[in-house]
Amino acid sequence: MTHNALEQTLQASLTCQQSDCSGAISDGYCDICGLAAGKSASASVPSGASSSKAHTQSSARYSRRTSARTSARTSQRMSSRRSDRHRLGLGLVSLPDLPSNAPETLVLDDPKVPENKRFCGHCDARVRRDRGFCSQCGSGYSFIPSLKAGDVVGAQYEVRGAIAYGGLGWIYLAFDQLLSRYVVLKGLLNSEDASSAAVALAERQFLAAVKQPNIVGVYNFVTHGGEGFIVMEYVAGQTLRDLRRRRGPLPVSEAIAYIHRILGAFSYLHGQGLVYCDFKPDNIMLENGDVKLIDMGAVRRIDDPEGDIYGTVGYSAPEAGEGPTPASDLFTVGRTLAVLVATIPDFRKTHRFTLPGPDQIPLFGQYESLYHFLQRATAQKAGERFQSAEEMAEQLFGILRQVVAQETGQEVSAGSQFFGQDPLALGNTATDFSNGTSMTGASSSGLPMLLVDESDPAYGAVMNALAMPDRESKLTQLQQIAPQLSSKEATLNQIRLFLEAGDTESLALARQKLQGHFHTNLQNHVCWRSQWYCGQYHLHHDRPKQAQRCFERVYHQLPGELIPQLVLAQVLEQQEQFERARELYERVWQTDRRYPSAVFGLGRCCTRLGDSFAAAEALAEIPAASPLYSRSRWEIAQTLLVQRSSPLNLTELERIAHLLPPPINALSPGLSKPQSLLQPKGHRTNAATGPRSERAVRIAIERSLRSLAQSRQPPHQRLTLTELANQIRPRTWF
């Protein structure tokens, strides 16, 4: 059945029970927020089943056979640089404990399939009765549970009852008499079609080999009365659908933690040449402090030319009906995350394949990087999405760092697999600071270096070439490597060397190679790298608007990375877009203090926006152990004491006294923050407010400035600081 045909069959039957939604339930899902129908406090059901006894809803699905499928791209298992990244919450988020469910409370008293979910398993035509023959193709069908309590299936599994109706038929709770454990039996859509039962059962044998901690286990395959059943692990807990319905939109950090963890399961499946097809909040279960992917009924081989395709309207990718791929799987992951954190208006119609903007959902403006992530994850063109679960997880981890830092105010630092260190942290500056002026935005020669992509076929050869002692030798080696080994990194590093040279001839060669890359390399990882160097090229030619567009694209592709946001802020600052630049600088510095360019940029933007004390407070966060400590205190003195249009009052003087460093002899090795200024003898002090008299405060500031002038400062700065000390000191007779 096509997408359009499916939509024509959907009928409104219930009102959404969400407190913040007025939508109607269409085929089991709200037509506004996209959440499944059911009781708000219903128990969870394993293996993808709905748990409400009043409404046994399953997803609205499409199913069609196709003759061509996209081949699987082998993916490696998700790697991690930190052991915490193998935990739910990544060591960054505290998640609530959830109760487990008593299995037999899930059994339905009167299992019925709603009329709007009754379709012929052979031709997809709508059928009305519980049992009969399709009026279109004549095939027999039955929607009556074929098993009842007390039946023993496969001489081993005692049925306790039906617990839900899923996309592939009835789901039953059973007890394994041999191993004394509860299991789930998942049957076929049409119990009257014995031949289909045999074929489907044979086609699902590969699921027995799926072994991953975050995927429900498949134990066995059995038949009973001509019907086939998959025997699966019983998972006690709650689905994200139930959690979302009960609590409303989840905290962003909590939702990200759940989705990040489940991406390991997708990485495993894709590496096995399988696609999940039908991911949504219903199909991820929280149990024992972890998450598990349940309902394996829709899983299929990527290269299967004949298998049925199942999906849920509002979650499935536009192209999924023509053949699911890892990219279409990851689309469903992005849509699920969006539903967990926000109520998407008109989820299954207007915003079926798109997301509303921050003007409609303020949360997307509050967490801008998350919005960029969701936009890329759910792009309508498959080539513009994340291409692997590993790539998606890496960026989502970066998003989580930014969210946690924003919510808690605590730094969450981590290394980058794409970018080198902040040049300022390495002692490099785009502008010579010794002349008394700090950096004023991005410079083509002051950008962080891109790291060589380890997946490039010539990675080792490129690294050896870059280790050559001079630029010409590097270029010669790279020019030989690029055509021989089809190395994109060899070409991109040639571009970098040309840009760093900065002369007219080199820039012309860089432009020529950049144009070639844009026309011949459309892969995302190459595209954003080309955009990075394109932005650097525009900076060479003093074209900040064009550079901004390039770095915006890099930020969109890598929303979890901080360096693109830092460089974008610098470009925006050059164009005097201080408010936007300030937001980016603040996010970068708040998340990771290893990027001091961000705090100096933040100070500049605050100053230009007229908030000199906010600028000074930001700069005061540079610790005393940092090589940039003296520079930051010089900036504070400049910001607060130079070019003032009005005299300082006592309150302002006290704030300045707390922001400037103590005298040199008061600093100790490893000091992370300046202590209170030493006070002159004979003046009373107050621990909460500092010195009480203006005279005492001025003397304290004077001593700090003279002490700062004695530290390692350029001569002109020492003179300026001495002059400021003379200006700030109280008047005396000598």
Image: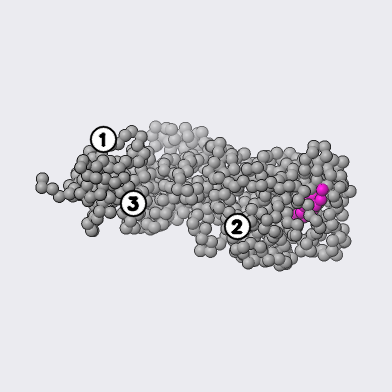
Nearer to the camera, 508 or 162: 162
Secondary structure under badge 3?
helix
CA gap, disc 3 and disc 1: 26 Å
- Indicate which disc, 3 or 2, sits on the residue closer to the N terminus: 2
- Which residue is identified by label 2? 248
CA gap, disc 3 and disc 2: 38 Å
Secondary structure under badge 2?
loop
> Which stretch appears magenta?
160-172
Q: Quick one: label 2, few (<14), some, or many (20+) residues within 10 Å?
A: some
Q: Is residue 246 visible?
A: yes
Tag 2: amino acid: Gly
- Indicate which disc, 3 or 1, sits on the residue closer to the N terminus: 3
Secondary structure under badge 1?
helix
- Which residue is identified by label 1? 665
Predominant SS of the magenta segment: strand
Which residue is at a point 71% across and 61% down the rendered structure image? Answer: 28
